[in-house]
Amino acid sequence: MFSFIKYATAACVAAGSIAIIGSLSAGPATAGQVAPPPLVLSPNLTEPWMLQLQPRVRGRATAPVRRQMQQPNVRRANWWSPRQQPVRRQTQPQKTKTRQVQPQFLPTIVQYDGKHKPGTIVIDTNARYLYLVQNDGTARRYGVGVGKPGFEWAGTHKITRKAEWPDWRPPAAMRKRRPDLPVFMAGGPDNPLGARALYLGSTLYRIHGSNQPWTIGHAVSSGCIRMRNEDVMDLYNRVGVGTRVHVI
């Protein structure tokens, strides 16, 4: 009994297998037969295989572009020295020519123990000072401008004339050296003789003012003694004609 059931079961299984194989290998359905449904694979099963067939493209995150500022070309002292930062050039103020007398040549009172009597004028051309000797053992000291090299002189004279805002008549020898000079110039603020003039003897030399105070303390004249206008006006009021003048 059990043998019959075993053989029957085996026969059914074999018959089912033959039927399934026949249905898979059979061609198009003939008349009266129904074609089996098409074999459809699930997308979930095919997707991994399709992805393997396609080239892999890895997306790269684009980093932000940093703008590099152009650094100035700075020359290094040595190849091993670090790069130095550029130094900004600081504009220095231009030096302007001073239009005033230097402080040491301003009028002052000094001690005097020389041999000259009070009321005498002593001019030290090397030190660029004029001294008016006073009665109390002091002297009034003024800064002066003196003759430039080649026009120095020394001697003793007296004041023979005084003039306020004097006219100027350049000597012929001076006009020969300076053809641009006028033959005559009336007194005034633009006149090179300045506000006052003290004429020395019969010479062409004078103690006079100047409209160029920055030349006081320098050797710039043709032999005359220059003073500031303020100083020559003060001296003018303190001395008279006949005052002795010593130039050393």
Image (tube, helix red, strand yellow):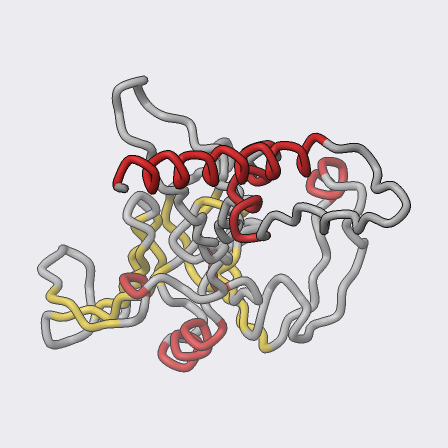
User: Where's the N terminus, which quadrant?
Assistant: top left
Query: For residue 122, which quarter of the picture?
Result: bottom left
- Residue displayed at 52% across by 47% down: 45
Query: For residue 154, which quarter of the picture?
Result: top left
Relative to 65, residue 184 above or below: below
Instruction: Point out residue 233 in the picture as x, y percentages from the top left corner.
Output: 46, 78
**From this viewpoint, which residue is outermost toward the top?**
79
- Residue displayed at 57% across by 67% down: 211
Relative to 182, residue 86 above or below: above
Instruction: Point out residue 90 in the picture as x, y percentages from the top left corner.
Output: 43, 53
**From this viewpoint, which residue is outermost toward the bottom?**
237
Residue 160 seen in the figure: no
Query: For residue 87, which quarter of the picture?
Result: top left
Total numbered labels: 0
Residue 2 in the figure: left or right of residue 74: left
- Residue displayed at 60% across by 64% down: 193
Instruction: Point out residue 74 in the picture as x, y percentages from the top left corner.
Output: 43, 33
Residue 135 seen in the figure: yes
Q: Nearer the viewer, residue 129 or 86?
A: 86
Residue 149 in the figure: left or right of residue 246: right
Instruction: Point out residue 145 in the picture as x, y percentages from the top left corner.
Output: 43, 53
Residue 94 in the figure: left or right of residue 174: left
Residue 151 in the figure: left or right of residue 111: right
User: Where's the C terminus, which quadrant?
Assistant: top left
**From this viewpoint, which residue is outermost toward the right?**
31
